[in-house]
Image (tube, rainbow, N blue to C red):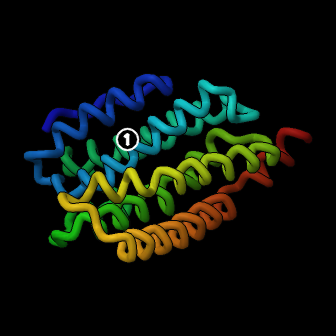
Amino acid sequence: MNKIPYVNNASEIIKVLESLEEQLKDSKLKKLRAFNTAYLIISRNIDKKNKDGYFEYPKLLENLDVNFVNYYLAAINNFYDQKPVANLWKIAFKTTNKNPLINLYLGANAHINDDLPLSLNETINTKAFYSDYQKAEVIIFKSLDEIINSIFKTPPNIFLKTFYKTIMKFLIKRWRKNAWNKSNIQDQIRATRS
C-alpha cells in the first residue's frame, strides 16, 4: 500500500478517502474498509451540507475535519511504517474479525475516542461551535442507512437494520460526547480571553 498523503482542505478529504478505499481492497488493512467507506459517506454528506450553508462556523468545521482525517491517515501511515499507533487503532488494524459491522465499530471507536479530542483541542476555540458539532452528528445519523447498506452484500432486514442503527447511534452519541468533554476546549477558550 502506498503512503497516504495528508490533506489541506475539505475537497482533498474526499479524494484521499476514495483513493484509500481502493488501496484497502487488497491490503493487510482490508478489514478497515467498512470504516473507511462509512467515513467517506459521512464526509461527502457533511461537505455537501457545509457548501449549502448549514453550519454557523463553516471554516472552523473544515479545519476540524482536515485535522481529524489527518489523524486517521497518520495512524495508517504509522502502522505501515511500523511506528507506534494508539492502542485503539492497533486493535482496529490487527483484528481478525470478519464481521464488517464490528470492523466499522472498531475503526469508529479508535477515530472518535483517540483522534477527535486531539482534533478538537487543536482546532476549536469557541464553545459556540458545539451547535455545529451537534449538527454534524445529525448528518452522521442521517447517513446510517447508506452506511449499513454499503457494508453488507445483502442489506439486512428492517428489524436488523433498525437494531444496528440504534446501537450505532448510541455508541456514536456517547463517544462524541466523551470526545468533546475530554478535549480541553474550555481551557483554550479561557486562555484566549486572558
Amino acid type at circle 1 is: Leu
Which residue lies under the disc numbered 1?
Answer: 40
Q: Looking at the image, which residue sits at the far right?
A: 194
Local packing at callout 1 (Cα closer than 10 Å; few below 14, some 14-19, many 20+) is: many
Question: What residue sits 25% from the left and 55% below the top?
Answer: 32
Q: Residue 85, can we see it?
A: yes
Foreground residue among 136 and 191: 136
**Residue 143 vertical placement versus 12 (above, below):** below
**Residue 167 vertical placement versus 5 (above, below):** below
Report the label total: 1
The quarter of the rendered structure image containing the N terminus is: top left
Question: What residue sits 32% from the left and 54% below the top?
Answer: 35
The quarter of the rendered structure image containing the C terminus is: top right
Q: Residue 91, can we see it?
A: no
Q: Position of residue 181 (x, y in %)?
A: 69, 63
**Residue 90 vertical placement versus 48 (above, below):** below
Q: Position of residue 189 (x, y in %)?
A: 82, 46
Q: Looking at the image, which residue sits at the far left?
A: 26
